Amino acid sequence: MKTLIITGASQGIGRATAVEMSNREDIGNIALVARNEKNLEETKALMNPKCNVMVVPHDMTDLEGIEKIVDKIYKEFKSIDLLINGAGFVNPTALLDTTIENFTQTFTVNTVSMLVMIKACVRYMKGKDAKILNIASTAGSTSRPGWVAYASAKAGVISLSKTLADELRDYKIKVYCISPGRCATELRRILAPEEDPTTIMQPEDVAKIISNLLEEEENCLDGQDIIVRQK
Ligand SMILES: NC(=O)c1ccc[n+]([C@@H]2O[C@H](COP(=O)([O-])OP(=O)(O)OC[C@H]3O[C@@H](n4cnc5c(N)ncnc54)[C@H](OP(=O)(O)O)[C@@H]3O)[C@@H](O)[C@H]2O)c1
């Protein structure tokens, strides 16, 4: 039985993915990471009860603490086979209005904590046919005036995913990167408050694609920026 860690599991795409992955027969253990413990418990309640679920409240800006939570998860489940990096933060502001705090928070949650999380997990994944999936954004590969911190942080996610797909191949670890377009979540509401969420892609649509990519048989889509967008 495989063990999966999902960050950003308290709502939106991360929650839908946790539910989707809990229905897979090859997955027995799932660790849910985010700050809001109550929302993580709500995610757990929606999941297939056949899975062992560990709720791990953690603020990803506490970079030093990431290795500790990964050690705790490994101690409990004795393996780490799959990692989905879904934690994301956006506070869209034009360059001259963006504070240092906003730049730092945006890059730390979306990009730096992802690198730290991957490093912590790879210690346990080496040589095990493991898979890592990072959630970037179409904002990372196109111009987004007014969202410069978020867009450039997501460009970093695309870049780190391509590099690590090559670098970690020797460890038999595959690294995937998806870039969703507009998806009906709280993060999207912050970016486009006037938009009707029923007219855009739903978190469950993205969750199904993530699950497909993390199937053992999927063997050729790693190391690419996979755009997930409704026509
Ligand atoms: N929705 C879209 O249109 C869209 C498009 C492209 C890419 N994405 C990406 O998809 C991913 C999931 O986002 P979403 O759309 O599902 O948004 P969401 O519903 O707002 O979820 C964001 C998740 O990130 C977690 N998070 C935020 N700050 C955190 C922190 N400091 N420490 C730990 N966890 C933190 C939140 O949990 P807590 O608040 O409980 O900590 C939440 O679980 C993100 O990487 C986002 O950038 C979304």
Image: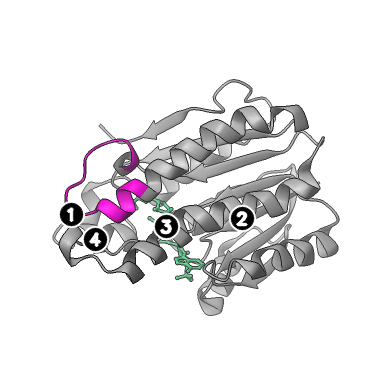
Mark 1 and ligand 1: say if the CB distance to the nearest ligand atom is below 8 Å. Answer: no
Q: Which residue is the site of mark 2?
A: 116
Return the x and y of residue 121 as percentages of the image width and height.
Answer: 71, 51
Looking at the image, which residue is at 31% across and 55% down?
A: 149
Q: Is residue 183 visible?
A: no
Do labels 1 and 4 touch, CB within 8 Å? yes
Residue span colored magenta = 140-152
Tell me the distance, in whole angstroms, between the alpha carbons under discs 2 and 4.
24 Å
Q: Which residue is the site of mark 1?
A: 146
Q: Earlier in the sequence, mark 3 or mark 2?
A: 3
Dot 1, how many residues are within 10 Å of its Cα: few (below 14), some (14-19), or many (20+)?
Answer: some
**For this view, does 30 lie left or right of residue 103?**
right
Mark 4 and ligand 1: say if the CB distance to the nearest ligand atom is below 8 Å. Answer: no
Q: Which is closer to the viewer, label 2 or label 4?
A: 2
Q: Name the residue at the left extreme.
A: 194
Return the x and y of residue 59 as percentages of the image width and height.
Answer: 54, 72
Could you say which disc has been placed on residue 107 in the image? Answer: 3
Q: Earlier in the sequence, mark 1 or mark 4?
A: 4
Q: Which residue is the site of mark 4?
A: 92
Tell me the distance, in whole angstroms, between the alpha carbons under discs 1 and 4.
6 Å
